[in-house]
Image (cartoon, helix red, strand yellow):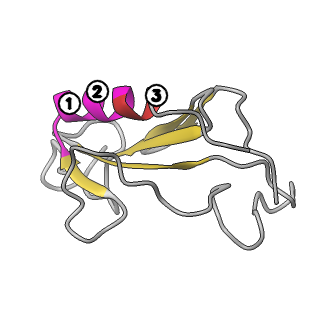
């Protein structure tokens, strides 16, 4: 099994970012077109720049076996699957849709303070 990578880091995407925490978890915050978020502009122009809310997801970040494809035994995003953070209603999904800015801050705080992942 691959080791949990506990090196913290920040990763930017056109429609959001991922934070990798020393506890072994990652938090993804995304907005814009093709994400569970409401754009400030109804026609979705510049939706990658601004939104009223965002989607969020968390997972255990593992060192990839294949650095060319960034996959771990066939899983994308260096994951073993998504982690459901307590205190949020996932509604049967792995991604939290339409979180307010305050809820995004709470989500990031909770992921950062999860107990460390066992290697």
Q: Give the mark nearest the N terminus, 3 or 2.
A: 2
Q: Which of marks 1 and 3 is nearer the N terminus?
A: 1
Marks 3 and 2: CB-CB under 8 Å?
no
**Near-viewer residue (33 or 100):** 100
In the image: residue 31, left or right of residue 78 = left
Residue placed under numbered mark 1 in the picture: 101
**Do the residues bearing badges 2 and 1 touch, measured as CB atoms within 8 Å?**
yes
Question: Which residue is disc 2 drawn over?
Answer: 105
Please provide percent x and percent y for residue 103: 20, 34
Q: Is residue 107 magenta?
A: yes
In the shown orientation, is residue 55 left or right of residue 58? left
Which of labels 1 and 3 is toward the front?
3
User: Where residue 94 appears, x then y in whole percent?
Assistant: 37, 64
Q: Which residue is drawn at 73% across and 73% down?
A: 74
Please, is residue 36 above or below residue 92 in the view?
Answer: above
In this picture, which residue range is highlighted in magenta? 99-109
Question: From this viewpoint, is residue 13 visible?
Answer: no
Q: Rounded to the nearest whole Å, what is the CA distance between mark 2 and mark 1?
A: 6 Å
- Quadrant of the snapshot with the N terminus: bottom right
User: Is residue 3 positioned above or below 66 on the image?
Assistant: above
Question: Can you tell which mark lies on residue 112?
Answer: 3
């Amino acid at each position: 099994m691959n080791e949990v990578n506990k090196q913290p880091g920040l990763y930017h995407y056109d429609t959001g970012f991922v934070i990798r925490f020393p506890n072994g978890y990652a938090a993804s915050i995304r907005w814009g077109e093709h994400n569970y978020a409401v754009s400030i502009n109804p026609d979705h122009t510049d939706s990658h720049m601004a939104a009223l809310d965002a989607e969020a997801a968390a997972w255990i970040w593992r060192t990839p076996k294949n650095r060319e494809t960034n996959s771990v035994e066939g899983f994308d995003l260096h994951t073993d699957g998504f982690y459901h953070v307590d205190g949020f209603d996932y509604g049967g999904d792995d991604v939290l849709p339409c979180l307010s800015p305050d809820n995004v801050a709470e989500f990031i705080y909770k992921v950062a303070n999860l107990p460390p992942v066992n290697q």
